[in-house]
Amino acid sequence: TLEELGEMVASASLCGLGQTSPNPVLTTLRHFREEYEAHIIDKKCPAAVCQGLFRTPCQHTCPVELDIPGYISLIKEGKFAEAYCLIKQRNPLPAICGRVCNHPCEFKCNRAQVDEPIAIKNLRRFVADYAFNLGVKYTPKIKERKKERIAIIGAGPAGLSAAWDLALEGYPVTVFEALPVAGGMLAVAIPDYRLPKNILRKEIQDIENLGVDIRLNTPVDDVESLLKDGYKAVFIATGAHKGAKAGIPGEDLAGVYDSI
């Protein structure tokens, strides 16, 4: 490894220059190992400055690497349905993300060097609502059907996205959800004025239309039991719900609850 190579150079060198030359690498490995791993293993630059690793900073910063320049160009040309289809190739929840995404892409938008970032999230919401209102449908090509069944625990955004991707790969997918409604925090924590329930239901229905079986009111207490039932893999997407502290006196008193 890079660390072993640096240590070998330091220990085997006979002069002071050779013994100290690996220090910058060894020191940054010690304090910023995650940066090395992101660049070398994941081929990602968290700061979006290593241009050899990406096409555009906005696309590189997007968690699902949406083709942001592509769909914005289509919007510019008035091809709104085509823009929606391009987004849907990577993101099964465009209308939801168009409302509640924290849009890290905009913080790395090149346009900000001229005046201000492009409203990338709002443009995504626009084309998703356009498709919703006009009944535009798009489903990427589904690969050949496979026999191996996959179980997913949790019907939140992670579980639903995994179900979409696996279904497109041809796997029969079953999603087990403890709550009486699918969507996780999207359904029970975000108010309607930010994320209307009809938008949430529509995008979940698109996932179910791929053949995904979502079983509500079905908590899973034993992962091994799913494997015994014939599922070849289990993806645990139960979330890690925790409310943010306000940092004010009295918030830890009895009877005080956060929104989560």
Image (cartoon, grey):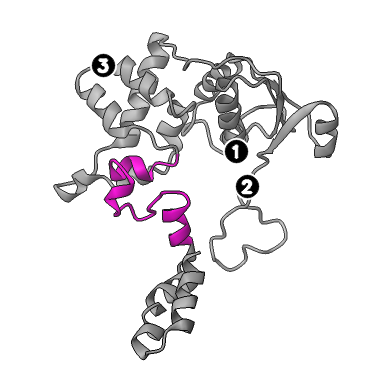
Mark 1 and mark 2 in contact? Answer it, CB < 8 Å.
yes
244 is higher (above) or lower (below) than 104:
below
Give me the C-alpha separation between circle 3 and circle 2: 40 Å
**Residue assigned mark 2:** 260
Q: Position of residue 237 (x, y in %)?
A: 65, 39
Q: Amino acid at mark 3?
A: Lys
Q: Is residue 55 located in the magenta-colored stretch of the structure?
A: yes
Mark 1 and mark 3 in contact? Answer it, CB < 8 Å.
no
Q: Secondary structure at mark 3?
A: loop
Give me the C-alpha separation between circle 1 and circle 3: 33 Å
Q: Amino acid at mark 1?
A: Met
* Relative side of 208 to 11, left or right: right
Q: Which mark is residue 185?
A: 1
Give me the C-alpha separation between circle 1 and circle 2: 9 Å
Q: Residue at x 25, y 23 (%)?
A: 75
Hey, which quadrant is residue 76 in on the image? top left
* Relative side of 36 to 162, left or right: left
Q: Residues within 10 Å of mark 1 (few under 14, many from 20)?
A: some
241 is higher (above) or lower (below) than 142:
below
Q: Residue at x 26, y 29 (%)?
A: 72
Q: Amino acid at mark 2?
A: Ile
Total tally of numbered discs in the picture: 3
Which one is in front, 181 or 61?
61
The magenta region covers 34-63
Q: Position of residue 94 (x, y in %)?
A: 43, 27
